């Protein structure tokens, strides 16, 4: 027989809130998708953190999210984020230049996969 697909409203609400919290964590923490050159350490650390966050109660997850949102408004945090973003851009530019210097034939390939930015620099 088929398993019952309808869960209690509390279970659905908890799942929905958890999904929102996790989505929000990803949005507020763009570093989650930045990585080292091979990315293994960063991905592992983030996966482990996500596992620990998932083990928290919904209430604790919501408190964590609220604290992160509040912290994101702090001028020091905003400045650090801008500094981090600039460092990432500089790293990518240096890596690209070095790759092209090493093998000029990768330039057209890099153009195909380039992240295009629009708006203000």
Image (cartoon, rainbow, N blue to C red):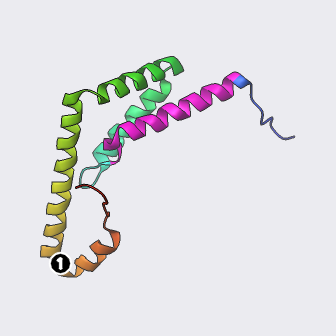
In the figure, residue 76 lies in which quadrant?
top left
The percent coordinates of residue 61 (x first, y second) are 46, 23
Q: Secondary structure at mark 1?
A: loop
Instruction: In the displayed orientation, state which residue is furthest to the right.
Output: 1
Instruction: In the displayed orientation, state which residue is furthest to the bottom.
Output: 105
Q: Quadrant of the N terminus?
A: top right
Residue at 17% across / 80% down in the picture?
104
Instruction: In the displayed orientation, state which residue is furthest to the front.
Output: 120
Q: Locate residue 114 relative to residue 7 in the image: left or right.
A: left
Residue at 29% across / 51% down in the picture?
39
Q: Main secondary structure of the magenta part?
A: helix
Q: Work out whether residue 117 or residue 47 is closer to the camera in this orientation and state it.
A: 117
Mark 1 is surrounded, within 10 Å at the Cα level, by few (under 14), some (14 to 19) or many (20 or more) other residues, namely few
The percent coordinates of residue 50 (x first, y second) are 42, 34
Q: Work out whether residue 94 or residue 45 is closer to the camera in this orientation and state it.
A: 94
Rendered view: 13 above or below 103:
above
Q: Quadrant of the C terminus?
A: bottom left
Q: Is residue 3 magenta?
A: no
Rendered view: 94 above or below 82:
below
The percent coordinates of residue 6 (x first, y second) are 78, 33
What residue did someone put label 1 on? 103
Rendered view: 59 above or below 23:
above
Q: Which residues are magenta?
A: 10-33
Q: Work out whether residue 46 or residue 93 is closer to the camera in this orientation and state it.
A: 93
């Amino acid at each position: 027989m088929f398993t019952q697909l309808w869960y209690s409203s509390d279970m659905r609400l908890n799942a929905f809130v958890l999904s929102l919290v996790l989505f929000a964590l990803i949005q507020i923490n763009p570093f989650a998708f930045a990585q080292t050159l091979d990315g293994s350490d960063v991905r592992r650390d983030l996966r482990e953190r996500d596992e620990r966050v998932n083990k928290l109660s919904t209430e604790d997850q919501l408190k964590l999210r609220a604290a992160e949102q509040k912290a994101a408004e702090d001028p020091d945090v905003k400045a650090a984020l801008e500094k981090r973003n600039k460092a990432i851009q500089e790293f990518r530019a240096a890596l690209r230049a070095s790759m092209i210097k090493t093998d000029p034939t990768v330039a057209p390939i890099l153009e195909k996969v380039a992240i295009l930015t629009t708006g203000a620099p």
